[in-house]
Every structure is written in C-alpha cells, then in structure tokens.
Image (cartoon, helix red, strand yellow):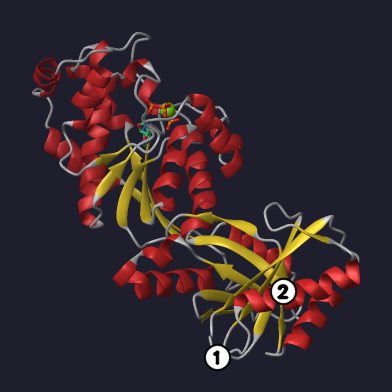
Amino acid sequence: MSSPSFLVHYQEIALKGKNRPWFLARLVRNLRQAVRDLGGTVVRSLMGRIEVVPGPGVDPDRVAERLKTTFGIANYSLAGRERLDLDAIAAAVLRDLGAREAGSFRVSAKRADKRFPLTSPQIEREVGGRIGQARGWRVDLERPELVVHVEVLTDEAFYYFGKERGPGGLPAGTAGRVVCLLSGGIDSPVAAFRAMKRGCAVTFVHFHSYPILSRASQEKARQLVDLLTRRQLRSRLYLVPFGDLQQQVVLAVPGPLRVVVYRRLMLRIAERIARARRAQALVTGEAVGQVASQTLENLAVIGNVASLPILRPLVGMDKEEIMSEARALGTYPISIVPDQDCCTLFTPRNPQTKARRATVERAEAALDIDGIVGQAVEAAAVEEFEFPDV
Ligand code: ATP
Ligand code: MG
C-alpha cells in the first residue's frame, strides 16, 4: 500500500446517543495523546470512523501498538486510500493484494456518502468480480478466508484486508473518576484495568509499611501504575505510609481482628483521597471467598466504613481467570515479585473469617480514627505518571 493509514472503528460509543459527539471527541483526544511521541502522526475524525496517519518514517507497527491499548476502539486496519473512482479502487485493491493467497473471499463495502453513484452491493459485486477474475478465488459470503473491505467517504475511498480487534471498552475518562486500592498483588491491577475499560479515570492508592518492611511493594506499585498508565495516559499514585498506624492498631486490637481493622482504615483513607479528587467510587481487587479475609461477612464489615460505592470488578472471577488476564495485561510478572505485604504485619496466621461489626467497632473505639486517617493522608507521597513519556 502506498502511504497507508489506519482506519479505526468504534462501536459501543457509536451507540451512546446524544453523548456521541462528546465520547468521540474524547476518543480522538486520547488517541492524539497516545501517539504524540510518534513524530507527525495525525489523528482525524472522518464520518463515523477515525483515521490515524503514521508520521513520515514512523513504523505503522508502533502506531498499531497504541491502538491496541486505546479503549473505545472496536477494530482497526491498515488501509490504502484511493480517489473516488471504481476502476481506480479495484486496481489498487488488486495491486495491494500482492502475493496474498486465499481459498475464498468476499468484498464488504460501506458507502458513508450516498452521493457515490454505486450502492454498496454494487461496489461489492464490481470489485468482487474483478478479484475473482484476476485471482480465481471462490466467493464465500458466509465464511470467507479473506474479507476485502471498501469504504467510500466524501473525498476518498479506503480499502483494507481483514480487521484487527481493538481493546473495546469506553474511552478513558468518559465515566468519571474512581480511586483504586492497589496492592502489589495480582488482583488489584486487573481490577483497575477493568474499571478503566469502562471509561473510569483511575487514581491509585498504595499502602506500605516502609521502613518497617522493605521498599519492594512501593516499587511494584510504581511499575504497575506505569504499565496501566498506557491505557489512561495519565495517572496519580498516592503512596501512603501505613506502618506507624499499624503499630497503633496493634496496641488496641486483638490479633485476629487486625486484618479487618487495617482494611477498614485503608478504605477510610482511600475515601478521603477520593473526596479530594472528586472521585465517585472506590475499586478493590476483592473476590468473594478468594482468601480467608474475603468472606461475605468480612467484606460487609470492611465495606461498611465507606460511604462511596465500592466496585469489585473481579467478584465473579476465578483466580485462574484473573491470573490469565494479568498475564495478558503484562502485570503478572510484576505482581509475583516477592515483597512484604503490609497486611501481614503484626497479624497472626489465622485472621478472623467472620468478623462482627460490633466487635470490630468496640476494638476501634480505642483508636483516634479521624486523626489517624488525617495523618495518613497528610503523609502520603504523590507521584504522577504519563504515557507516552516525552
Ligand atoms: P491483591 O492481589 O489485589 O493484593 P488479594 O487477593 O491478595 O488481592 P487481599 O490482599 O486480601 O487480596 O486484598 C484485597 C484488596 O484490598 C486488594 O485487591 C486491594 O484492592 C486492597 N489492598 C490490599 N492491600 C493493599 C495495599 N497494601 N495497598 C492498597 N490496597 C490494598
Ligand atoms: Mg494482596
């Protein structure tokens, strides 16, 4: 193809009725940000699709990489461009099919501008007939090996062979902000990804017990946020020191209840950060019954301290499924690096699996909860992430 460009299709956002122009503008803006280090690459909105033209000398594969991680894209293809003339379009298709072989094929045409003299079925028949004649391939409308696409717009036509699936979802930032409690584990990064996929802008909060424990968990959190930022382009991470506060908990709360009390404190702190960031929900990587601390009873007693909704995107997933999603996402190798999780600090091996709210509240009565939460937020270190890093 001579000077090919990417033709990008969005599906779900096309259905969003009145908000459609707004969703589309956001997707275009996100795409522009995502390719801004790929010198001269241009993103433009074109009658129900988006064209992304790789800058001079930019490898199209590098552009494709960015399309793969931009939520809101249903599919994309590297397409050739031709003037609005059927003979020219058919000739360009035949030329660019090159050495490609296919047992069967079909032409799929779309006419976005009805002023073009041929209808879509006519374009399909004309172009299909010429391909059949030149290459001897069989037409199969049901299950073709190759689909040749032709899209006729106002000033030009595009053609391409096959489609690559995009990541789907909604454009980053269209659903409002959430705060994700990000441990160094396998689950919470996947939960954050799921929230992002639905258009949430995610702010991250990580609790660590440095200097009582090592710095490892903070470094993992940074690496995870760095990787996830590819999907939302800008992130903020709050690193909240949790060790001092845990020492206070130890003095007041019996061993088996500590994990639940830690979690309640985490949620309260995260919620205070969420309010400051105007976030509308909290996100965790919890799944019912996955570990002893995640019984329905405990989830209830833990969640009860928050007044914002708590989203648990992994609630219906098996650990195996979460792990394979983490692998696909690339977070898995970071998550499995050994660290020292703050939740195990000063806790016995057998935490309470069915904590009762009254018991927990009685134990917490000895703590200055408001003061502890305020101090933790004050002490948080804030780091900003951006993708691409230019
Ligand atoms: P994960 O793999 O996400 O750590 P998990 O199965 O190990 O999940 P827990 O360790 O019980 O489960 O944690 C449950 C949830 O609580 C986590 O998914 C995360 O959202 C939150 N959480 C736990 N520890 C931390 C932490 N140190 N910092 C921030 N959030 C945390
Ligand atoms: Mg964990």
For this rendering, which residue is in front, 129 or 92? 129
Tell me the kind of residue under disc 2: Arg
Q: Are marks 2 and 1 in contact (CB under 8 Å)?
A: no
Element at label 2: helix
At a point 12% along the width and 38% down the height, the residue shown is 370
Look at discs 2 and 1 and give the one toward the viewer: 2
Tell me the kind of residue under disc 1: Arg
For this rendering, which residue is in front, 73 or 347? 73
Residue 280, labelled with which disc? none
**On the rendered structure, is 388 left or right of 294?**
right
* Residue 228 seen by the camera: yes
Q: Position of residue 328 (x, y in %)?
A: 60, 41
Residue 125, labelled with which disc? 2
Q: Position of residue 267 (x, y in %)?
A: 25, 36
Which residue position is annotated with label 1? 115
Disc 1 residue crowd, few under 14, some 14–19, many 20+, Cα 10 Å: few
335 w.r.t. 167: above or below: above
**On the rendered structure, is 35 left or right of 280?**
right
For this rendering, which residue is in front, 334 or 254? 334
Number of numbered discs overlaid on the protein picture: 2
**On the rendered structure, is 269 left or right of 108?**
left
For this rendering, which residue is in front, 35 or 183? 35
At a point 40% along the width and 21% down the height, the residue shown is 290
Residue lying farthest top? 350
Disc 1, ligand 1: is the CB inside 8 Å? no
Element at label 1: loop
Disc 2 residue crowd, few under 14, some 14–19, many 20+, Cα 10 Å: some
* Residue 38 seen by the camera: no
